[in-house]
Image: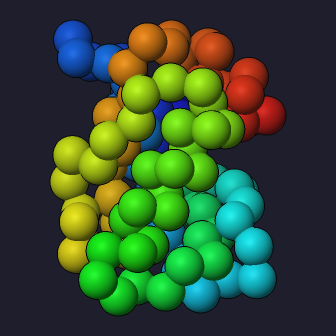
Amino acid sequence: MGKFIKETKDGVLLLIYVQPKAKKNAVEEVDEWRGRLKVRIAAPPVEGKANKEVVKFFSKLLGGEVSIVRGETSREKDLLVKGLSVEEIKKKLGI
């Protein structure tokens, strides 16, 4: 299992690295150096817009409840996904 996805008692922790102001929202490759899943987000990193977009994008993509548990002001964010298993998330992300 990749370092960027972990099962916890509260749900699945997904470690991501966000690149804001992209042309479109997209999941890129796993950044092995950071140990995080690289994600492009169209929203700019101002007034929480990129954070809202990250939550919305992953909620829609995964079909689960998603929240940011760490990294509100950083490009490196930890997302908590509830209601899905690691296997289900990997399948939906295509990894």
Q: Which x, y percent locates residue 89?
A: 60, 24
Q: Which of 27/4 is in front? A: 27
Total numbered labels placed on residues in the image: 0
Identify the residue at horizontal 46%, vertical 33% (top origin).
Answer: 5
Examine the image and state in which quarter residue 63 appears.
top right
Q: Is residue 68 above or below residue 40?
A: above
Identify the residue at horizontal 72%, vertical 61% (top origin).
Answer: 26
Identify the residue at horizontal 29%, vertical 49% (top origin).
Answer: 68
Q: Is residue 18 above or below residue 81?
A: below
Examine the image and state in which quarter residue 28 appears.
bottom right
Q: Which quadrant: the C terminus?
A: top right
Direction from residue 19 to residue 25 in the image, left or right: right
Q: Which x, y percent locates residue 36?
A: 48, 54
The colour scheme used to paint the residues is: rainbow
Q: Which x, y percent locates residue 58?
A: 55, 44
Q: Is residue 56 above or below residue 54?
A: above
Q: Which of 2/55 is in front? A: 55
Examine the image and state in which quarter residue 46 appears.
bottom left
Identify the residue at horizontal 33%, vertical 59% (top origin).
Answer: 77
Q: Which x, y percent locates residue 11?
A: 32, 18
Does the image show residue 34? no
Q: Which quadrant: the N terminus?
A: top right
Does the image show residue 90? yes
